[in-house]
Image: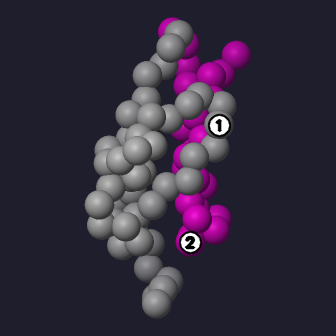
Amino acid sequence: MHHGMMHTNFGVPNYRKSLTTGKKHYLYSDYSDPILADIEWSAGEAGMYHFEFDATDSENPTLLVTLLE
């Protein structure tokens, strides 16, 4: 049961721990899945990146990484 608390420890399943730039990724909290992997991300190219954590839908938070032009 969800009590409206914000869970602040997020990760991804072991089989899907690499983030892709420009693609929205669903995150999981240790509350919803206690066996989580750290998120791995490599820039691929030099530049400034924007990390957008969206918890508007608290049951399905997402992380989107985009390269700033």
**Quadrant of image for the C terminus:** top right
Residue at which label 2 appears:
59
Residue 8 visible here: no
Residue 39, position as x, y percentages in the image = 38, 41
Residue 22, position as x, y percentages in the image = 66, 31
Tell me: residue 60, above or below residue 48: below
Disc 2 element: loop
Please tell me which residue lies in front, 46 or 41: 41
**Neighbour class for label 2 at 10 Å: few (<14), some, many (≥20)?**
some
Magenta stretch: includes residue 51: yes
Q: Amino acid at mark 2?
A: Glu
| CA gap, disc 1 and disc 2 | 19 Å
Q: Residue at x 56, y 72 (%)?
A: 59
Please tell me which residue lies in front, 22 or 50: 22
Q: Residue at x 63, y 43 (%)?
A: 24
Please tell me which residue lies in front, 58 or 35: 35
Tell me: residue 55, above or below residue 22: below
- In the rendered view, does 55 fall on the left or right side of 40? right
Residue 3 visible here: yes
Residue at which label 1 appears:
23
Q: Residue at x 30, y 66 (%)?
A: 34
Which region of the structure is painted magenta? 46-69
- In the rendered view, does 69 fall on the left or right side of 9? right
Residue 44, position as x, y percentages in the image = 50, 14
Magenta stretch: includes residue 64: yes
Residue 54, position as x, y percentages in the image = 60, 55
Instruction: Give the quarter of the image for residue 68.
Output: top right
Q: Earlier in the sequence, mark 1 or mark 2?
A: 1
> Which of the colour schemes (rainbow, by chain, secondary structure, one colour) is used?
one colour
